[in-house]
Image (cartoon, rainbow, N blue to C red):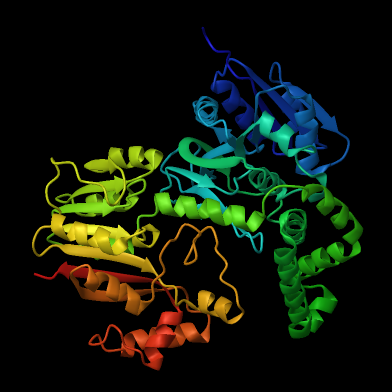
Amino acid sequence: MTMPIPTVSALIVSYNREDDLRTSIASLFATEWPSLEIIVVDNASSDGAAAVAESFPGVQVVRNSDNRGFAEGVNQAYALSTGDYVALINNDAVVARDWIEGLVAFLEARPDAAAAGGKVYFWDDENPLAATSNRYWAHTTVDPKTAFTTAHLDAKDGIREVATLSGALVMIRRRAIEEVGLPFLEPTFFTYYEETDFFARSIRRGWKLWYTDEPVGWHRLRASSNSRVYPYHFHMERNRLLLAWRNFPDDVLEAELRRTARRAADEWLSHPLAALAGKDEERRARRDAWLWLLRNRPLLVRQRSRTMRGGQRYDEVVEAVEARATYYGHERPEVAGLVPVAARYVVDVGCAAGHLGAALKRARPHVQVRGVEPTAGPAARARVVLDDVLEGGAEDELPPSWPAPDCVIFADVLEHLVDPWGTLRAWRARMTPGGTLVISLPNVGHRSVMGGLVRGAFRYVPAGVLDRTHLRFFTRASAIDLIEQAGFRVTHFERVIDGPRAAVSRLGRAAERVLPRRSLRGGDALAWLADLDTVQFLFTAEPIE
């Protein structure tokens, strides 16, 4: 029996830019999707944009007498739509011919996904439309403690779970919209962050979001509002904080409001004349955004009481999403760099989706990389890019057809095992004589953990040193004990330092330069300071004969 073809409703909010709108609508018709409805809401354009939309047969057009903003325009279009899927299309965005077909198929295969968005290429006078050699926006990340978003440029993503998506070109499941609750997009946002808020509410209620590098689209770089400094910065700052009010847990919201208030006070104190004169448009916009929040606290409280009913903590959900994306999709160049140049047969234990091994094979075509991965989905993806994959645990027997490895990688795996000592001893027997063991281990002596212990806290989190799936915890000394007790000798040691911002970081980096290599266990002050700033320890080791 043939399954019915899902209906797709393409929603476009138009404000001037009639030529771009014509190109955008034409690209939707070019997809030839058999069950497509296009709805355009025009926000009182001063050019012929509304007439352009009406010139296409079958396109529904709503003419507003004033500019009601992107969020309310989308809500108007959504109220008229009937599609199983809703596509948000900016009026200056263009889709590839397979865009609808590809994203519908992607979402049909993932019933727990609220939405999916793909790679979006730049399009302007220097970047021709429909060219796939242009630079592009890949996935977008959001900081769950500040609500700042980052669009990653030219990132080699493939398929990646994300915590938010760009609203320029995105396909959304209607059932997710109805379950998350109307209004679809909150009109208070007017423009910017409205889709980020919807996606925040979605993942808090258990829905998933996906980025995929296929199919693709194009988005014109010139932005109608970015050229107007004050409105852009006002809405970006106000709406960032509005999203925090609607989605952040109490403690995270309070911390961000305090930080923002301190920054506002610092700007007034450091630039009092500019603040009074209002000459600095960006500072004035941020100040006015802060004043708007102060004046509209009753509105914020009402919205928060509605959006915070039920659901998970936003910061924990975002951290969990990023942890999964990083675990299954990170190439780990700092680990790959420790694989000896002479290595020929490498086994990556806990290979996830095979990104580390694939990067190693690209850099060294002579190397064979096989993986061990207990999770079926990542194991299947790794099997495509590696020489072979065993779907199983680190303790399982290897297939008899595999050659004895001359290098074995444990990249953030041993801390998840019940008996890492026994596991390493078993792998020592499988390796070739003189082989190399490469290990990455999180450092429980990191300042974030030590600071929590001083306050009596040892809080597990979705990712990081205190990942809730960790069964074992290691300091520098106990990590070395683990390696030596399994019958190996450490041949190389280095630290992954997590940032140069704090004074302790500068001291830690100085310690790295000064500390002699003679003492891996060095207990002096410099070594201790370096450990405080070390997120991960990296080791290479060789079997003791």
Up-down relation of residue 204 to residue 493 (above or below): above
Q: Residue at image x 89%, y 54%?
A: 299
Left or right of 310? Residue 119 is left
Q: Which residue is drawn at 72% across and 76% down?
A: 263
Q: Where is residue 130 in the image (x, y as percent from the top left)?
A: 48, 35
From the viewer's perspective, is residue 9 above or below residue 447? above
Q: Position of residue 117 (x, y in %)?
A: 55, 39
Q: Can residue 130 be seen in this view?
A: no
Q: In the rendered image of this protein, does residue 450 appear above or below residue 284? A: below
Which residue occupies 43% across, 47% down? 157
Left or right of 24, for residue 333:
left
> Which quadrant does the C terminus fall into?
bottom left
Occupied quadrant, residue 272: bottom right
Q: As drawn, which residue projects farthest toward the bottom?
A: 524
Location of residue 84 (image quadrant): top right
**In the displayed structure, does residue 538 sit left or right of residue 461?**
left
Q: Horizontal and vertical percent for residue 219?
A: 57, 42
The percent coordinates of residue 31 (x first, y second) are: 54, 22
Q: Between 245 and 194, which is closer to the camera in this rendering?
A: 245
The number of discs equals: 0
